[in-house]
Image (cartoon, coloured by chain):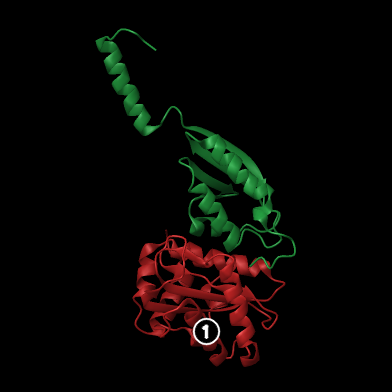
Amino acid sequence: MPTEWSPEMAAESRESLHQVHADPPLAETVSREVVVANSQGLHARPAERLAREARRWQSRIELVADSQRVDGKSILDVLTLAAEAGARLVVEATGPDAREALEAIGSLFDRNFNEHAGSQGT
Amino acid sequence: MKFSDFVATDAIRSHVDADTKEGVIREMGQALVDAGKIAAADFESIVKAIMKREDLGSTGIGRGVAVPHTKHPGVSRLVGTVAVSPEGIDFESLDGEPVQLFFLLVSPPDRPGDHLRALESISRQLRDEGFCKLLKAAKEPVDIQHLLEEADAHGVVS
């Protein structure tokens, strides 16, 4: 960190403040592939769990499948993926808590949304 | 999947009398019985299964929309209907808002793909707020039918 103030620094910091607003330097994007393990696919209940988890984080959470990119915080968006069993998706998190968010969401998929093979799964 | 692939036109209701979650589910189930889409003998067990599913977590997906549903061996293909409660009903939705627009789905146990594609159609169209508003404002079942037909024909760009 600079210790002495100068007009150049002020200009610089204004500029970086502007950048913070537009694209926070802390906002890294991390991503990982997940697989829909549930035999029923990504139906209403897992979609709701996913959106609920995604909303806990400040970061932007997106799901990417083939040609579609949707907001992971919206159940409606998640449901439009109609991701069936075995579908591979990429989860992308961008923001100050991206890593933690990605880990939490990845683990939801890894745990198959706590659904069991024998559950009704509607 | 198009709305016309699963929505039973004769079972559409534009103004439900019910003011409770179970009430609206019963009313929509009865509408499917009256339309000949589910057997009267299956009515109680379908309502019970839908309520059991709601216990696992509300199907109120926000924006005043709910998609109560179940699988049931009494149907050989996906059937569904649409209902509107102009006053709104407390459905314990994710966003806490009352629900005005209901899509009820009953699918055969062995067709998870069809169920997913119906959810996809519903959610894709409902992302459009204008479409939601028009459906909720429908005065007659035929208005809902026309809106669904229009969405099927042209899609709704959201």
Q: Position of residue A70 (x, y in %)?
A: 51, 50
- Pick out the residue farthest to the left: A7
State whether residue A60 is above or below residue A39: above
> On the image, which quarter does residue B101 sit in?
bottom left
Q: Position of residue A59 (x, y in %)?
A: 47, 40
Answer left or right for A108 relative to A79.
right
State whether residue B98 is above or below residue B18: above
Whether residue A18 is visible = yes
Disc 1 marks which residue? Answer: B26
Tell me the quadrant of the picture where the C terminus of chain A can be found: bottom right
Q: Residue at x 75, y 65 (%)?
A: A118
In the rendered structure, the residue with mark 1 lies on which chain?
B
Nearer to us in this view, A92 or A119: A119
> Total of numbered circles in the picture?
1
How crowded pointer 1 is (Cα within 10 Å; few <14, some 14-19, many 20+) is rated as many
Nearer to us in this view, B149 or B62: B62
The type of residue carrying mark 1 is Arg
Nearer to us in this view, B33 or A49: A49
Tell me the quadrant of the picture where the N terminus of chain A can be found: top left
Q: Colour of chain A?
A: green
Q: Residue at x 47, y 74 (%)?
A: B102
Q: Position of residue A25 (x, y in %)?
A: 43, 27
Q: Residue at x 36, y 78 (%)?
A: B138
> On the image, which quarter does residue A101 sit in?
top right
- Judged from the image, the secondary structure of the residue bearing numbered disc 1 is helix
Q: Residue at x 52, y 84 (%)?
A: B26
Nearer to us in this view, B124 or A18: A18
- Pick out the residue farthest to the top: A4
Whether residue A80 is visible = no
The chain that appears red in the image is B
> On the image, which quarter does residue B53 sit in?
bottom right
Q: Position of residue A104 (x, y in %)?
A: 59, 43
